[in-house]
Image: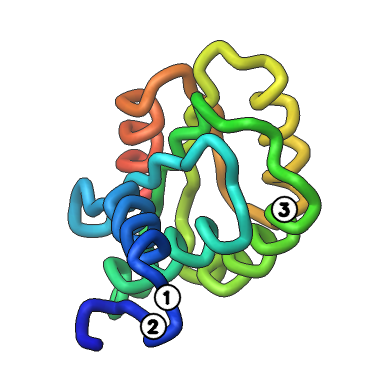
Amino acid sequence: MGNGQRPEEPDEALDLRAEVRSRVRRVDDRLFLMTEVPVQTPFTLDVMFDRLEELAAGLDRFAYVVDLSNVRRPDAAAREKLRQRVGEVNSRLVHVGLVVGGNVVIRAVAKLAAFAIGFRSFSFHMTVDEALEACRNALR
């Protein structure tokens, strides 16, 4: 099963895993973009962070942008998974740019979550381009 499929996963789960993995991509050498799914779950967060760690393998420092402009408020299980997964990469994380667009509810939730999760350096942005630029500046 060299395609990342676990033996017990049905085709639907494999399709979902592939779709979620495609939402994490390299933008520059040390800069990544994660386009979050509308409803975060521990499963989607694991898949996205597994992909991020795969792309950032061997890097001592990196930054990423998370596009949260189309997400709903995560539930307690998703928030806990997020805390765990960010904690695993936090020592190498230079900056996180959070794209919240004009969604004031998500901006407020993201601000509380960013502190609770323990991001060392983060900023909020209206657009992905603004967030990418903030991350590039932090990496310099």
Left/right of residue 65 with respect to residue 113 in the rendered view: left
Q: Nearer the viewer, residue 65 or 6?
A: 6
Residue 11 locus on image (x, y percent): 33, 66
Q: Nearer the viewer, residue 102 or 18?
A: 18
Label 3 to label 1, Cα distance in Å? 24 Å
The residue drawn where x is 80% and y is 52% is 76
Quadrant of image for the N terminus: bottom left
- For badge 2, the amino acid type reads Arg
Residue placed under numbered mark 2 in the picture? 6
Closer to the camera: disc 3 or disc 2?
2
For the residue labelled by badge 3, is the local secondary structure a helix, a strand or a loop? helix
- For badge 1, the amino acid type reads Glu
Q: Which mark is residue 79?
A: 3
Label 3 to label 2, Cα distance in Å? 25 Å
The residue drawn where x is 67% and y is 15% is 104
The residue drawn where x is 52% and y is 66% is 46
Question: Please, is residue 124 above or below residue 95 in the view?
Answer: above
Residue 23 locus on image (x, y percent): 33, 47
- For badge 3, the amino acid type reads Arg
Q: Are marks 2 and 1 in contact (CB under 8 Å)?
A: yes
Label 2 to label 1, Cα distance in Å? 5 Å
Q: Which mark is residue 9?
A: 1
Q: Is residue 140 visible in this depiction of the protein? A: no
- Label 1 CA crowd tier, 10 Å (few <14, some 14–19, many 20+): few
Q: Are marks 3 and 1 in contact (CB under 8 Å)?
A: no
For the residue labelled by badge 1, is the local secondary structure a helix, a strand or a loop? loop
Quadrant in the rendering for residue 112: top right
- Label 3 CA crowd tier, 10 Å (few <14, some 14–19, many 20+): some
Of the numbered discs 3 and 1, the one sitting upstream in the chain is: 1
